[in-house]
Image: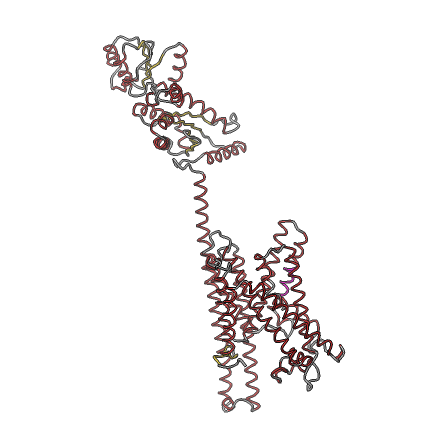
């Protein structure tokens, strides 16, 4: 009835406008209803399921009651020209296709409050019910056959001789037992089956697309719900993908079923393998066993389907292999989009999967080419036989023998060339997709490594100064401790630095100025210790770990730090206290011992700098307790001329080595002297001129006068000109 308006032939099969229009109309109508009415699934589906189940069961029951034969009259149970086992295997190995559709239960489970056990019970009940209905239809079809047939086998084998109701075994049987009423019941059941299949397909695929869109495998627009809280965009996508199938004709459905069977076999095998892996992680023995069995069964099914011609007369249609190759190529390019948009890097890491898919395409292409060659050869043999028997088409029969043979050879060569071209194109496309995907994976991997390195670097970097932070310092400490334990430590020294006066700056100028003071201090440390890592381990604390070149000149570098701080006391720049300690092999059991000594020496340096006018945290805190503004805190800070002694018991010390100064400071403070410090002759002369009434004694090294470019005699005369002050060398 629907075979009107011939459009074109596809692989030798006609495609008619009537069938195309009916299919497209059904898809559009079901999609519209599905996107606008939630009750379609809640009320219409159960009603149609009851009609479908009840109609087939009713007709089968009527056949049992009206059947006047015995079970032996239903023989043969199998087709005689092949073994019963082979036929049973054929049915069993295409069974994965029969289970397509049951996933609509799990895909829709999110919308219902089903427990895991309840969902399992529904699945089992669905499988058992479907199996029973399949058996009912099969038995119903063989209980009645036309009078001119000797049995059901004769009827089925010569089915093309009949038309109308007689050309449909199940409907013929329903009419035989129930008349037109039986045909109406079976038609209602069949219509319900078609509608429920379309609705379930729409629901299950739209929910699948909706779920994968939420996981960013499809564009985010397919993860949106409409005003009815339905995934309308996902449903429209299902319809858009379904409509082109109408143009391949009804015959092509068989090819799609074959490809679906292969796809389902692969999918169930993958799910079984995933379940086995997950069960092994959870140490669930039962699920490990079922997962392993499921994977083994699906592997056997897949092998049988792909090599079906080796196991008997059953085989997949030739066009199925071509469709499988096209499907795989499209999958390659779609996966390219998935990888490109996979921000969390969940896909494409296993290169073996890509190789397996490419191998599958090559393997399927070889099978397809072989099948096409067989068909071409058989067709040529048939034409040759007809030519020599005189039964060929008139146009063929009129050819002379040489021309006829050459035409057949040209036909075979044309088929071979076409096959080679198709295989080459598909292989190149697959290889191109593989290379593109692989390059995309490498690009993402490089980006991921860069982001990971950047994140790691950021996690180990102090955001204010750019120095390595305390976490990095602790990592380095662990590395050094491990090296000490294993006896493979190279020589190193630790410098502990503390920034003086930070609290006063924060209190008087604000924390922004304090941050700038910390950055300035960090730059000074980096400029001095240019070949060593600098760590900021506290608000005003830095640590330098010296090896190699810096280690070789560590004392000179520390002296440079001291000189810089002394100079900055007068200038108002950053003042940094520093102490250094060497690792002593065999004596220091850990990094902490070296650090502790350096920390103690840093505090000694801090005391010395305070005597020279530096402001410490303790000074600022004492001033705050006394109510004195921090800006007024003075500890001889400023130029040498501005340093005012507190009493007349002052000793002027002129020395450029801070270690000696520290020793003198401890001794003289025990004798209750206040000490003025000068780092060179110029500084000493400045102090003498301005405070000659307060200085009781001068301690100096005559070599310091050379800094004034004076010899010893002129240097001493300069001191005597200011005032006669006791001198000692």
Q: Is residue 45 above or below residue 658?
A: below
Quadrant, the N terminus:
bottom right
- Residue 50: name its quadrant: bottom right
x and y percent of residue 238 in the render? Answer: 50, 65
Secondary structure mainly formed by the magenta segment: helix
x then y, percent, for residue 240: 48, 67
Q: Looking at the image, can residue 622 be seen?
A: yes
| Relative side of 514 to 241, left or right | left
**x, y percent for residue 558:** 38, 26
Question: Looking at the picture, does residue 383 appear above or below residue 621?
Answer: below
Residue 291, relative to residue 640: is it above or below?
Answer: below
Q: Position of residue 39 (x, y in %)?
A: 55, 63
Q: Residue at x 30, y 8 (%)?
A: 726
The quadrant of the picture occupied by the C terminus is top left
Question: Of residues 180 and 505, which is closer to you in this image?
Answer: 180
Q: Which quadrant would residue 193 be assigned to in this image?
A: bottom right
Q: In this orientation, does residue 605 appear?
A: no
Residue at x 39%, y 10% (from the top left corner) = 672
Q: Which residues are magenta?
A: 294-301
Along the viewing direction, whichever of 425 and 13 lies nearer the viewer: 13
Vertical position of residue 590 compared to residue 261: above or below: above
């Amino acid at each position: 009835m629907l075979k009107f308006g011939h459009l074109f032939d596809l692989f030798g099969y006609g495609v008619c406008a009537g069938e195309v229009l009916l299919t497209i109309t059904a898809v559009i109508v079901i999609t519209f209803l599905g996107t606008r009415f939630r009750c379609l699934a809640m009320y219409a589906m159960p009603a149609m399921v009851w009609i479908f189940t009840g109609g087939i069961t009713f007709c089968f029951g009527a056949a049992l009651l009206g059947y006047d034969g015995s079970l032996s009259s239903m023989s043969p149970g199998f087709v005689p020209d092949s073994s019963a086992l082979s036929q049973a295997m054929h049915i069993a190995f295409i069974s994965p296709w029969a289970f397509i559709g049951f996933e609509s239960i799990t895909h829709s489970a999110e919308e219902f409050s089903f427990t895991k056990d309840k969902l399992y019970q529904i699945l089992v009940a669905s499988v058992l019910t479907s199996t029973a209905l399949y058996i009912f239809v099969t038995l119903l079809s063989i209980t009645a056959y036309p009078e001119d047939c000797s049995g059901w086998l004769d009827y089925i084998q010569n089915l093309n001789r009949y038309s109308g109701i007689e050309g449909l075994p199940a409907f013929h049987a329903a009419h035989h037992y129930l008349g037109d009423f039986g045909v109406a019941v079976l038609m209602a059941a069949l219509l319900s089956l078609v509608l429920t299949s379309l609705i379930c397909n729409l629901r299950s695929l739209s929910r699948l697309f909706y779920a994968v869109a939420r996981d960013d495998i499809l564009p985010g627009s397919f993860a949106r719900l409409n005003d009815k809280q339905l995934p309308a965009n996902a449903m429209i996508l299902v319809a858009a993908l379904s409509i082109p199938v109408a143009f391949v004709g009804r015959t092509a459905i068989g090819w799609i079923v074959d490809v679906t069977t292969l796809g389902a076999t692969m999918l169930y095998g993958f799910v079984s393998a995933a379940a086995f892996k997950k069960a092994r992680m959870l140490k669930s023995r039962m699920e490990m066993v079922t997962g392993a069995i499921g994977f083994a069964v699906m592997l056997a099914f897949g092998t049988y389907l792909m090599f079906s011609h080796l196991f008997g007369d059953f085989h997949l249609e030739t066009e199925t292999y071509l469709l499988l190759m096209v499907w795989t190529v499209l999958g390659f390019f779609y996966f390219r989009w998935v990888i490109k948009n996979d921000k969390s890097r969940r896909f494409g890491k296993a290169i073996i999967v890509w190789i397996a898919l490419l191998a599958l395409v090559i393997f399927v292409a070889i099978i397809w080419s072989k099948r096409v060659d067989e068909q071409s050869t058989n067709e040529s043999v048939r034409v040759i036989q007809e030519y020599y028997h005189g039964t060929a088409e008139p146009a063929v029969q009129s050819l002379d023998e040489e021309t006829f043979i050459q035409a057949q050879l040209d036909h075979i060569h044309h088929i071979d060339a076409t096959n080679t071209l198709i295989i080459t194109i598909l292989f190149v496309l697959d290889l191109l997709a593989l290379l593109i995907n692989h390059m995309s994976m490498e690009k993402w991997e490089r980006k991921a490594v860069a982001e990971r390195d950047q994140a790691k670097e950021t996690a180990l970097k102090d955001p204010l100064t750019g120095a390595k932070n305390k976490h990095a310092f602790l990592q380095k400490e662990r590395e050094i401790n491990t090296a000490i334990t294993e006896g493979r430590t190279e020589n190193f020294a630790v410098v502990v630095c503390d920034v003086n006066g930070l609290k006063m700056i924060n209190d008087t100028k604000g924390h922004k100025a304090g941050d700038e003071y910390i950055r300035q201090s960090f730059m000074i440390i980096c400029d001095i210790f240019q070949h060593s890592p600098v760590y900021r381990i506290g608000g005003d604390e830095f640590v330098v770990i010296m090896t190699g070149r810096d280690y070789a000149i560590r004392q000179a570098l520390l002296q440079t730090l001291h000189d810089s701080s002394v100079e900055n006391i007068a200038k108002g720049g950053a003042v940094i206290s520093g102490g250094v300690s060497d690792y002593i092999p065999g004596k220091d059991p850990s990094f902490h011992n070296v650090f502790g000594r350096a920390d103690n020496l840093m505090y000694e340096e801090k005391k010395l700098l305070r005597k020279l006018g530096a402001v410490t945290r303790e000074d600022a805190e004492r001033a705050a307790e006394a109510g004195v503004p921090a800006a007024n805190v003075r500890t001889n800070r400023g130029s040498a001329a501005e340093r005012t002694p507190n009493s007349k018991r002052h000793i002027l010390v002129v020395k450029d080595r801070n270690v000696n100064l520290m020793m003198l400071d401890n001794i003289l403070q025990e004798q209750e002297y206040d000490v003025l410090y000068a780092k060179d002759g110029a500084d000493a002369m400045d102090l003498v001129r301005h405070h000659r009434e307060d200085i009781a004694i001068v301690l100096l090294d005559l070599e310091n006068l050379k800094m004034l470019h004076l010899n010893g005699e002129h240097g001493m005369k300069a001191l005597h000109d200011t005032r006669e002050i006791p001198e000692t060398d």
